[in-house]
Amino acid sequence: MVDKTGLAANNTSLSTSDGGHNAVANSAIHTGNPVYRRRSGLNKVMMSLSIVTIVFGLFWLFWIILTLITKGASALSWTLFTEITPGPGASGGLQNAILGSLLMSAVGTAIGTPIGILAGTYLAEYGQRGWLAPMTRFLNDVLLSAPSIVIGLFIYALVVAQQGHYSGWAGSLALAVLVIPVVVRTTDNMLGLIPNGLREAAVALGCPKWRMITMICYRSARAGIITGVLLAIARILGETAPLLFTALSNQFMSWNMNAPMANLPVVIFQYAASPFKDWNELAWAGATLITLFVLGINVLARNMFKK
């Protein structure tokens, strides 16, 4: 007598086994599938190209940093921060250039940051309808990508040519124009990431819109907005072209913002192109200072954004 139960079990196991093999054979993720092989090969090629481009970019970055450190480290000393720019063949430092750059960058940031935050706030909170907000975003993107020398020429025609002399105020105004689009873009993006539920909850409790923006939106987007301000500062610290047309330079220490003012980018430009070896060393030292400071600001900004 044949055991029907055992035969049924054997048939079931065989069908299950055959079904499993057929499922594997018919699966798209299988080395025998030509589509899978083609896509896998393309993925490997693109991944290899990505790695090559990353290594290519990092190679030049580390080479630039290494060159700046090796050539500028010898000129880094306490004298660099305590003495003003010297004449040919004399010893000196970059005190007036460092302080001039810090002063004009601080004034430019103080002018550009409130304007950028207010403009970004309008775009994010009030610009949902109408044509003004899209047009403003477009013009801000154009200004963000505009060459800095164009900004310098604009401020030269607007301020320097009218006053008849270069000044620290003109340099600060040129830097402020460079700060504004960066802060506008960052503020607009950061406020746009805040959930609308927070706004609706505040309005439902009777909170005015201006108070909702200052107490809820700004607090929620504070890290991102500060990051944008830091990135804007990092951008303007190394700008040479706008300061050549506005602040020019000054070999002596001067706190007069209504007169030409020394600054690191222009001093580096002048000393690097000079035939004097001591000036070349100071140019390398100044370039090293700017690079290290900008790198520090970028690292700080990224850490703040992660938090």
Image (cartoon, rainbow, N blue to C red):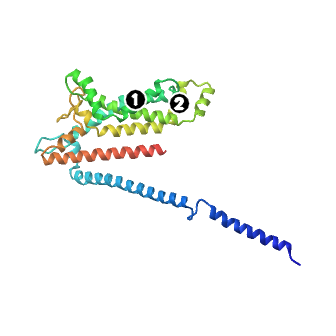
Residue 228, by quadrant, is top left
Q: Position of residue 189 (x, y in %)?
A: 48, 35
Q: Position of residue 195 (x, y in %)?
A: 57, 35
Of the pair 69 and 15, the residue shown nearer to us: 15
Q: Is residue 140 above or below residue 95?
A: above
- Give the labeled residue for mark 2: 215
Can the viewer see residue 257 in this picture? yes
Describe residue 112's horizontal placement relative to residue 91 as left or right: right
Of the pair 242 and 305, the residue shown nearer to us: 242
Say few, some or many: other residues with alpha carbon within 10 Å of mark 2 (under 14 / 14 to 19 / 20 or more).
Answer: few
Residue 240, by quadrant, is top left
Q: Position of residue 97 (x, y in %)?
A: 23, 38
Mark positioned earlier in the residue sequence (2 or 1): 1
| Residue drawn at 27 percent across, 36 percent down | 101
Q: Is residue 267 above or below residue 62?
A: above
Describe residue 295's horizontal placement relative to residue 188 as left or right: left
Q: Position of residue 39 (x, y in %)?
A: 51, 57
Q: The disc labelled 2 sits on which kind of residue?
A: Met
| Residue drawn at 47 percent across, 57 percent down | 42
Q: The disc labelled 1 sits on which kind of residue?
A: Leu
Which labelled disc corresponds to residue 53? none
Describe residue 294's horizontal placement relative to residue 31 as left or right: left
Q: Secondary structure at mark 2?
A: helix
Q: Residues under labels 2 and 1: Cα distance?
A: 29 Å
- Give the labeled residue for mark 1: 139
Q: Is residue 157 above or below residue 197?
A: above
Of the pair 170 and 60, the residue shown nearer to us: 60
Of the pair 14 and 138, the residue shown nearer to us: 14
Describe residue 141's horizontal placement relative to residue 286 as left or right: right
